[in-house]
Amino acid sequence: MVIVLAGPGGVGKGTIAGQLVALDPRLWLSRSWSTRTRRPGENPDAYVFVDRAQFDEHERAGGFLERNEFHGNLYGTPRPSVDADRDVLLEIDVNGARQVREQVNDALLLFVDAPDREVQRRRLQGRGDPPERVEARIAEAERERRDAVALDCVFLVNDDLDRVVAEIRQLIDVARKARVAPPR
């Protein structure tokens, strides 16, 4: 099963994904590629940080399930090669979720949002995004919400980490049970 964790920047997708993988050994978190520079203090494993030439070469070889350009940087999710007994968790944006849905019709699409724009703004600032990037991400979030509605994503608000992780785990459990239901 493919599970997409989408949402605007600063809503806590990375934190949620880390919690989910720590709690569920059947989940495998895909690490996206990015041409952007690593933020100060950012975990070097947050992305596979590459230059544009490496990214383009991997894309030409058909190595990405989805890819996007955001604020001049490229992002891509490598095609997963995972054991059949594991589910793939993708932490991507809504454009990526749309591309995944086109290829994996039964993917579970989850859209995580911040409780409000001020909380999102503080989170973006707290992780070191410059002011112009913060405002661009806030503006982009409005479009992402509209697109998530059109994709029929399940909406979740990250106002309490433990609660939202528990809700997502329940959604994953329901989806897993639906996939293995015996035929009638």
Image (cartoon, rainbow, N blue to C red):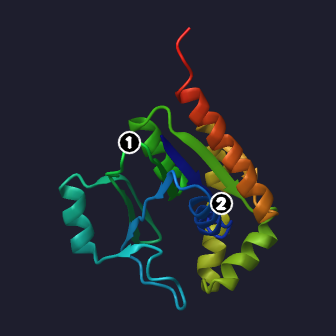
Reading the image, the residue beneath label 1 is 84
Percent position of residue 89, x then y = 50, 53
Q: Position of residue 94 (x, y in %)?
A: 55, 51
163 or 184: nearer the viewer: 184
Between 146 and 38, the one lying in front of the other is 38
Q: Quadrant of the C terminus?
A: top right
Q: Is residue 165 above or below residue 149?
A: below
Q: Please provide percent x and percent y for residue 163.
A: 80, 57
Q: Which residue is depicted at the point 59% across and 62% down? A: 17
What is the three-letter code of the residue carrying label 1?
Ala
- Spot the residue most to the top: 184
Task: Tell me the kind of residue under disc 2.
Answer: Ala
Q: The residue tagged with tag 1: helix, strand or loop?
A: loop
> In the figure, is residue 154 to the left or right of 22?
right
Using the rendered image of the protein, determine whether residue 24 is visible from the camera's viewpoint. Answer: yes
Query: On the image, numbered disc 2 is attached to which residue?
Result: 141
| Residue at horizontal 58 percent and vertical 53 percent from the top | 5
Q: Based on the displayed image, in which of its 4 quarters is residue 56 positioned?
A: bottom left
**Label 2's element?**
helix
Kindly tell me whether residue 149 is visible in this rendering.
no
Of marks 2 and 1, the one in the foreground: 1
Q: In screen coordinates, is 52 left or right of 165?
A: left
Distance of label 2 from label 1 (alpha carbons): 34 Å
User: What residue is drawn where x is 44% and y is 82%?
Assistant: 44
Tell which circle, 2 or 1, labels the residue nearer the N-terminal end: 1
Nearest the camera: 120 or 32? 32
The residue lying furthest to the bottom in this view is 40
User: What residue sits 64% from the left and 40% below the top?
Assistant: 173
Residue 24: x and y in percent read 58, 55
Picture quadrant where residue 49 is located: bottom left
